[in-house]
Image (spheres, rainbow, N blue to C red):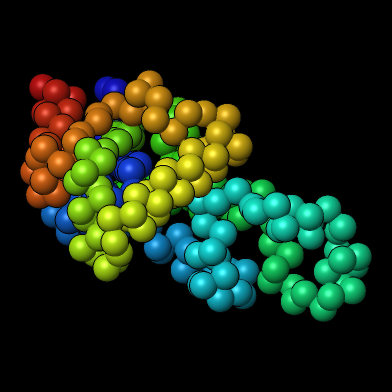
Amino acid sequence: MNTPITLLTLSHQYGSGGSLIARDLGQRLNWKVWDKEIVQTIASQQHVSEDYIETKDERVGSFIERLVESFGVGGFESAYNIPPPLRLKDSQLARLTRKLIEEVSQEGSAIVVGRGGNCILANRPETLHVFVFASLDARIERVMNVEGLTTDEAKRRITGMDKLRTDYVHKFYQADWRDADGYNLQLDSSVWGETGTADFILQALEHHTESVRG
């Protein structure tokens, strides 16, 4: 990288606090955060509910969804009166998400959370790609506290979300979500805490800016 960084992608394990870290960074940098905002924007563009997009966000369709899609418009869907919004396929949502992230990258001064952002913008030189992870115990404790789940429920939620994100990136970007080569910086939030992790990311941005100027 020999140009100032104007964009940050932040991928994170479920329960690592990645979304809150992104919000903290957004406030400190005065950069817009694109996380749930991606869901909101696409829902508005497609005239569907945010809840509907949320259920398909960063997911590869279930067996029954793929079965419905295999019948095509006018077949299974028409016969069972499935409303138009349910015809938005996973691949279509992935394309819409990619298009939006690419548009965001052109404006700069933004943080893109998850959704294969590091893959989509892998060749954009002005971008820092960060991965935030945490120990399993820390993730379990955090999910239990935030979502009010039991230990077993939190474990299942974490396992399920990790698989969804792994499958999503593998299917649409043919990449390994946890591959270190996809990131410039990886940080353990269970060691540094959410604020400390954000501090490290800011230091990396500042160091790069100084090296470019110097």
Q: Is residue 71 left or right of residue 111?
A: right
Rendering coords of residue 195 (x, y %): 10, 49
Rendering coords of residue 197 (x, y %): 14, 42
Rendering coords of residue 183 (x, y %): 33, 28
In the picture shown, does residue 12 fall above or below 128?
Answer: below
Depth order, front residue of 151/8:
151
In the picture shown, does residue 53 fall above or below 93?
Answer: below
Measuring 61% from the left and 37% from the top, which residue is drawn there?
A: 171
Measuring 29% from the left and 26% from the top, which residue is drawn there?
A: 184
Question: Count of labels shown?
Answer: 0
| The N terminus - image quarter | top left
Quadrant of res 182: top left
Measuring 33% from the left and 54% from the top, which residue is drawn there?
A: 152
Rendering coords of residue 190 (x, y %): 15, 41
Depth order, front residue of 71/85:
71
Measuring 17% from the left and 28% from the top, which residue is drawn there?
A: 208
Q: In this view, does 164 lie to the left or right of 30?
A: right
The answer to whether any part of residue 34 appears in the image is: no
